[in-house]
Amino acid sequence: MAKAGATKSGGAIDAMSYETALAELESIVARMEGGQLALEDSLAAYQRGAELLKFCQSRLTDAQQKIRVLDADVLKPFSQSE
């Protein structure tokens, strides 16, 4: 029914970059906060947003793990004097 209009891009999440997924998530949040979506569209947007959030969190966790490996699992504090 109205599901097709629930998301802006609606593509496969696994094929997205982090930045693309985050931009779509931000768009969904803005549209939902606008309060103009029909119930079915709101439900579809919420579901898509939850999937995008899970994907973004996973990508950030992966990036943190890679940083730990690159730093030999010793995260160094940032110092502005260096």
Image (cartoon, rainbow, N blue to C red):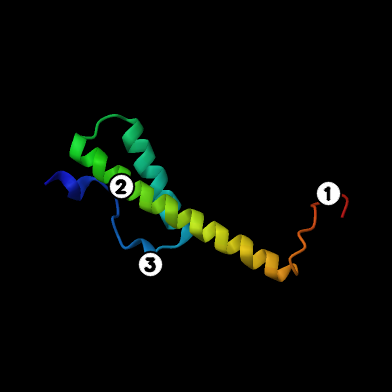
Q: What's the amino acid at mark 2? A: Gln
Q: Residues within 10 Å of mark 2 (few under 14, many from 20)?
A: some
Looking at this rendering, what residue extends furthest in the front direction? 73
Q: Earlier in the sequence, mark 2 or mark 1?
A: 2
For image coordinates 35% across by 43% down, the residue present is 28
Kindly identify which residue carries mark 3.
Answer: 15
- Looking at the picture, tell me which residue is in the foreground, 23 or 55: 55
Which mark, by number, is residue 47?
2
Looking at this rendering, what residue extends furthest in the top direction? 35
Q: Earlier in the sequence, mark 3 or mark 2?
A: 3
Kindly identify which residue carries mark 1.
Answer: 80
* x and y, in percent, of residue 4 in the image: 19, 50
- Closer mark to the observer between disc 3 and disc 1: 3
Q: Earlier in the sequence, mark 3 or mark 1?
A: 3
Q: Residues within 10 Å of mark 1 (few under 14, many from 20)?
A: few
Q: Is residue 1 left or right of residue 53?
A: left
Q: Is residue 69 left or right of residue 27?
A: right
Q: What's the amino acid at mark 1? A: Gln
